[in-house]
Amino acid sequence: MTCKIGRTYDSNHPTCRSCELQEVALCRGQLQAKSSKYKSKKVALDGIAFDSKKEAARWYQLKIMEKAGAISDLQRQVVFELQPAAVINGRKKPRLKYLSDFTYLENGKLVVEDVKSAATKKLSTYRVKLHLMKTIHNIEIKES
């Protein structure tokens, strides 16, 4: 038998006991499933999982635009490297990257698009990544 995180279940292991206690609490209604930080609901469209209804709706619009020939080379979740991994004070730090929601070509020009709520547009991490994308790759993020 395996526990919730896929380990062989062991009633003496603290993680297994924690999974067991959480499961019991969920069943009794004492613990609610954790909701998204910004209250977005994950959805699936055409067998693809999206982080929000807004993102799925935008994908649908872009697919229609691609079929009509207004855009081409539509892609999801494209990674742009902002800074390679580095060693700082003897500790290795991972590379900095930006993960776009969508990229496509419009009139021969690359468009990088991100679906954001008003709250997430204000996050300092996101604002810094926008700045780095413009500085390093000379790409302005289209927000929708």
Image (tube, rainbow, N blue to C red):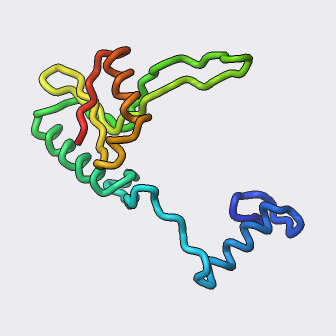
Quadrant (top left/top right/bottom left/bottom right) for the C terminus: top left
Observer able to see residue 73:
no
Q: Judge whether 58 appears above or below 105 on screen.
A: below
Among all residues in the image, which is located at the extreme right? Answer: 12
Q: Relative to residue 98, is residue 64 depicted above or below?
A: below
Q: Position of residue 114 (x, y in %)?
A: 30, 38
Identify which residue is drawn at 25% across, 38% down. 143
Task: Name the residue rendered at 41%, 24% in the picture.
Answer: 80
* Foreground pick, 46 / 26: 26
Q: Left or right of 72: which side holds 46?
A: right
The residue shown at (42%, 30%) is 98
Q: Residue at x 63, y 85 (%)?
A: 28
Q: Residue 66: x, y in percent?
A: 17, 37
Image-based side of 56 in relation to 97, left or right:
left
Of the 4 image quadrants, the one containing the N terminus is bottom right
- For the image, the number of numbered tags is 0
Q: Position of residue 41 (x, y in %)?
A: 38, 61
**Vertical arrangement, residue 28 with respect to residue 18, above or below:** below
Residue 121, located in which quarter of the rendered image? top left
Frontmost residue, 113 versus 70: 113
Using residue 117 as the reference point, say whether residue 69 is left or right of it.
left
Tell me if residue 133 can be seen: yes
Residue 33 drawn at (x, y percent)? 54, 69
The image quadrant that residue 44 belongs to is bottom left
Left or right: residue 142 versus residue 2 is left
Q: Nearer the viewer, residue 45 or 27?
A: 27
Above or below, 54 relative to 141: below
